[in-house]
Image: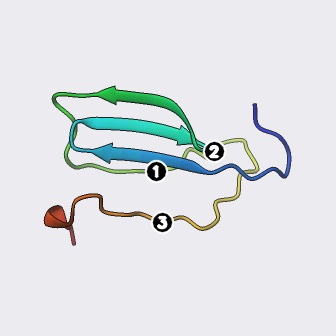
């Protein structure tokens, strides 16, 4: 459960056929998808909440697949 004024660290991992969600270092969701989406949009759902996003970063896990 979320608590007021307590930061959480979320990691979303899309590495080839691996899709994972990690919250504060704990793996919540980690699956193998043999046919993953390879492009599209990413967004945050911020309807009816008081969420603040801080220190947002995106990293490439594979240097041979850099996108512009």
**Circle 1 — which element?**
loop
Which residue is tagged 1?
43
The N terminus: image quadrant? top right
Dot in front, 3 or 1:
3
* Quadrant hosting residue 64: bottom left
Residue 57 is tagged as 3
Q: Gap between marks 2 and 1, in whole Å? A: 20 Å
- Marks 2 and 3 sit apart, C-alpha to C-alpha, by 16 Å
Query: Position of 18 compared to 53: left or right?
Result: left
Q: What residue sits 30% from the left and 62% below the top?
A: 60
Taking the spot 54% from the left edge, 64% from the top edge, the residue there is 56
Residue furthest bottom in the image: 68
Q: In the displayed image of the protein, which residue is found farthest to the right?
A: 4
Q: For this view, does 43 lie left or right of residue 35?
A: right
* Label placed on residue 24: 2
Q: Closest to the observer: 3 or 45?
A: 3
Q: Residues within 10 Å of mark 2 (few under 14, many from 20)?
A: few
Residue 4 left/right relative to 13: right
Q: N-terminal of the two: label 2 or label 1?
A: 2
């Amino acid at each position: 459960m979320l608590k007021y004024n307590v930061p959480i660290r979320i990691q979303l991992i899309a590495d080839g056929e691996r899709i994972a969600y990690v919250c504060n270092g704990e793996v919540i969701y980690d699956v193998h998808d043999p046919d993953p989406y390879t492009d599209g949009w990413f967004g945050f759902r911020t309807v009816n909440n008081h969420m603040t996003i801080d220190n947002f970063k995106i990293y490439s896990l594979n240097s041979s697949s850099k996108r512009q």
